[in-house]
């Protein structure tokens, strides 16, 4: 019995070995046969795209790499007259698809088509070749454009729209700001957005049967400075809250000197929260002892030369800045007559005269933060600017245009004898101005509520020109 079992085991092992080696041999045979077929197939398609490789709906099987490249080059020629209009709202630059080499990426597509099934992995190659031959393999089309050419063509617009951000400066000494420069945002063309817009139109451009024109808006992005105004001080000064301007063209040199001197002395003044600002107190003594020169002022019903002529140009400009900032005005006085300087860039009534110590201009800082006064004199254009910096609290100031209620003509010129002038010489010492009753209103709104409602009335007397006639022999 045992002998019989041993014989059966021998027979089983013998059959198993035979079957095992048969399958090994068959597998090796099939492997070598398939390898042989693959080698033959690869030789047939040497330097050619394997059958069933499809790009953009076209089977490039059996075609050379150069053929694929030229095929897409021809397609690019059909779209090279497509135009792109890049507009920033004011300027436009027109660029063709040819200018930026926009179209199919023929080099990459030709390489991808011929590289499929030619890796170092035998089984991967076999799988891809069989898949392409039986069912086809579709490669996604690839597109390109020259970013270098695009930026070169858009360079004028990019430069035009670039502003460098400015970091803030703030130096505080002895209760006054010695050096101040508010931070300023910069800007530049959003290049990434431009590229995204261009790429988003690719399929539309490629599928068009004829050249088309596409408008691409050039968007501008804000560049923040490294140091903003709020980071360089602890006084709550963050931004511009009000600005006022006035012109003083045709002023005599002494008047220009006084305007510059007075505005310089107010530059850097800080107004604490809840403090009432007095122009006369902040400016101090106005006389030859404090550096002022003689220029025309209104005194005792006459326009005469006096120390500090032109200071009212400074108070008038500050008055306009305070109006626009929406601050409460506690004292404002109009001039006795209409002064031509103050109407060079506005209607009548937007002036504020001062004459220390009694005639003053006052307002209150009710913003809850410090306010910084900054002054700027343009010596070429003869323009004075006041800028008030602080922190906005949501108030909006609406200053309405002046309304002239009534007017009266200037009186006839007045001639007065002057024994100090040679006979036959005339000298004008006062200038004519028509009279007028004028008013304007202002409303300040905060959080939907009216917090200030002003009416500023000016009664200007008609003013006669005065001439001195020499009587000296």
Image (cartoon, helix red, strand yellow):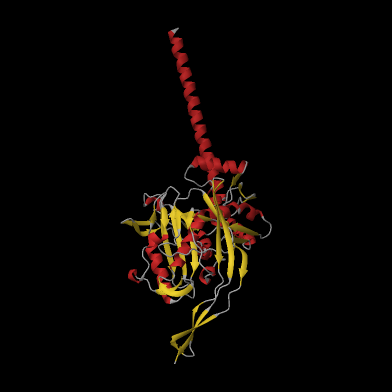
Q: Position of residue 400 (x, y in %)?
A: 58, 58
Q: Compare residues 100 and 249 and report the one nearer the observer.
A: 249
Q: Position of residue 55 (x, y in %)?
A: 61, 50
Say whether residue 189 is visible: no
Furthest residue in direction top, as rendered: 1
Q: Residue at x 37, y 57 (%)?
A: 169
Q: Quadrant of the C terminus?
A: bottom left
Position of 262 relative to 124 (above/below): below
Q: Quadrant of the N terminus?
A: top left
Position of 306 relative to 416 (above/below): above
Position of 215 relative to 274 (above/below): below
Number of numbered discs: 0
Say whether residue 290 is visible: yes
Position of 391 relative to 411 (above/below): above
Answer left or right for 371 relative to 146. left
Q: Position of residue 291 (x, y in %)?
A: 34, 70
Q: Compare residues 359 and 4 and report the one nearer the observer.
A: 359
């Amino acid at each position: 019995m045992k002998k019989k079992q041993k014989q059966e085991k021998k027979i089983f092992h013998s059959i198993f070995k035979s079957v095992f080696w048969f399958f090994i041999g068959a597998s090796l045979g099939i492997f070598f046969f398939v390898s042989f077929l693959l080698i033959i197939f690869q030789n047939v398609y040497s330097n050619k795209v394997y059958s069933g490789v499809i790009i953009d709906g076209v089977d490039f099987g059996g075609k050379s790499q150069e053929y694929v490249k030229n095929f897409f080059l021809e397609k690019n020629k059909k779209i090279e007259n497509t135009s792109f209009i890049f507009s920033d709202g004011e300027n436009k630059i027109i660029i063709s698809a040819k200018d930026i080499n926009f179209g199919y990426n023929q080099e990459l597509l030709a390489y991808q088509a011929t590289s499929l099934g030619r890796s170092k992995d035998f089984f991967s190659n076999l799988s891809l070749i069989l898949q392409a031959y039986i069912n086809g393999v579709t490669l996604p089309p690839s597109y390109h454009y020259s970013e270098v050419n695009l930026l070169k063509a858009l360079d004028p617009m990019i430069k035009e729209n670039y502003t460098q951000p400015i970091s803030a400066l703030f130096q505080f000494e002895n209760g006054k700001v010695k050096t101040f420069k508010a931070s300023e945002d910069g800007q530049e063309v959003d290049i990434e957005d431009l590229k995204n817009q261009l790429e988003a139109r690719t399929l539309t451009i490629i599928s068009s049967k004829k050249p088309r024109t596409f408008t691409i808006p050039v968007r501008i992005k804000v560049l923040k400075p490294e140091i903003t105004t709020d980071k360089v001080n602890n006084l709550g000064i963050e931004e511009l809250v009000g600005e006022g301007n006035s012109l003083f063209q045709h002023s005599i040199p002494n008047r220009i000197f006084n305007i510059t001197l007075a505005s310089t002395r107010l530059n850097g003044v800080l107004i604490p929260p809840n403090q009432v600002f007095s122009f006369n107190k902040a400016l101090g003594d106005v006389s030859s002892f404090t550096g002022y020169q003689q220029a025309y002022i209104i005194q005792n019903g006459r326009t005469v030369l006096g120390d500090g002529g032109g200071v009212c140009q400074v108070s008038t400009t500050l008055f306009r800045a305070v109006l626009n900032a929406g601050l409460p005005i506690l004292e404002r006085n109009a001039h006795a007559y209409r002064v031509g300087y103050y109407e060079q860039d506005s209607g009548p009534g937007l002036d504020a005269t001062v004459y220390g110590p009694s005639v003053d201009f006052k307002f209150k800082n009710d913003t809850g933060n410090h306010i910084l006064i900054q002054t700027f004199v343009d010596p070429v254009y003869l323009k004075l600017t006041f800028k008030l910096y602080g922190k906005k609290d949501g108030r909006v100031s609406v200053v309405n245009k002046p309304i002239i209620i009534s007017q009266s003509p200037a009186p006839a010129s007045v001639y007065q004898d002057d024994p100090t002038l040679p006979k036959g010489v005339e000298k004008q010492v006062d200038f004519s101005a028509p009279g007028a009753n004028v008013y304007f209103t202002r409303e300040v709104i905060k959080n939907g509520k009216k917090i200030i409602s002003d009416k500023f009335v000016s009664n200007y007397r008609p003013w006669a020109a005065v001439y001195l006639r020499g009587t000296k022999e």
